[in-house]
Image (cartoon, grey):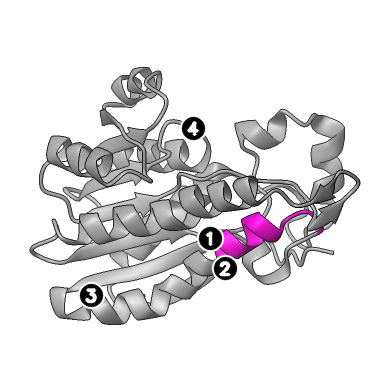
Amino acid sequence: MQITGAKAVITGGASGLGAATAQAFVAAGAQVTIFDRDPAGADFAATIGAGFAEVDVTDEASVIAGLDHAGPINVAINCAGIATAEKTLGKDGPHRQSSFARTIDINLNGTFNVARLAAARMDQGGVIINTASVAAFDGQKGQTAYAASKAGIAGLSLPMARDLARSGIRVVAIAPGIFRTPMLESLGQEVMDGLAQDVVFPARLGDPAEFAALARFIVECDYLNGTTIRLDGALRMP
């Protein structure tokens, strides 16, 4: 599939990895609609020449309304998600079930919700890209909820690709390492420098534009399907 002329929806597309992907796809000639819970995302969408719909990925009616607004699509990219830092048993007691459930609901259930509903709109084939994480494979302390949600996304790739093969839809997940996003930048330069030390090569944080470049490659490489690709500079979390 050529990126030029593609019609894509990107969840979480108003910031971070999603925003970089939306910007790159628009620049390459794709028609993009950003799905985001933050209504302020409409301003960013207008700035880059994308459409916008205020969407809660966990809510079926909200996603359907967003897809109706977007019109015909052949690409769906799931970047919406949250990170939870909480140990299974911490100083204040057991991990809160509510925070575990919320992380699974947004990251995993939200991804599946958008993927299944988007697939139903791809009547001439398409591509679904989901965002996993290296935490799916080597999660750290305090990442039980986050790692579980991202491992679920990685696990979706093959069976979903098999399910959708008859419809001509490919499914691939990207498992990014440590990327320079607004959420990470809020921790400060000293913390970011420390995190970058564990990256083998290049020894730096990932650039969201590199995530966008891989997403574009996935769309354009027709033989790439049913797998999860690590994008991490050979990082293995300690």
Q: State the separation of the CA atoms marked 4 and 2.
A: 23 Å
Q: Which residue is mark 4?
A: 15
Q: State the separation of the CA atoms marked 4 and 3.
A: 29 Å
Residue 5 sits inside the magenta stretch: no
Residue 112 appears in the rendering: yes
Q: Position of residue 78 (x, y in %)?
A: 40, 51
Q: Which residue is mark 3?
A: 164
**Numbered disc in front, either 2 or 1:** 2
Tell me the tag on residue 151. 2
User: Could you classify mark 2 by the number of other residues whose Cα lies within 10 Å: few (under 14), some (14-19), or many (20 or more)?
Assistant: many
Amino acid on which disc 3 is placed: Leu
Magenta-drawn segment: 141-150
Q: Position of residue 182 (x, y in %)?
A: 62, 31
| Viewer-side residue, 218 vs 130 | 130
Q: State the separation of the CA atoms marked 2 and 1.
A: 7 Å
Quarter of the figure with the N terminus? bottom left
Query: Can you say whether 155 is above or below 207 in the image?
Result: below
Dot 1: element: loop
Write the residue at 39% across / 79% down. Answer: 158
Q: Main secondary structure of the magenta part?
A: helix
Amino acid on which disc 2 is placed: Ala
Compare marks 4 and 1 and give the one earlier in the sequence: 4
User: Could you classify mark 3 by the number of other residues whose Cα lies within 10 Å: few (under 14), some (14-19), or many (20 or more)?
Assistant: some
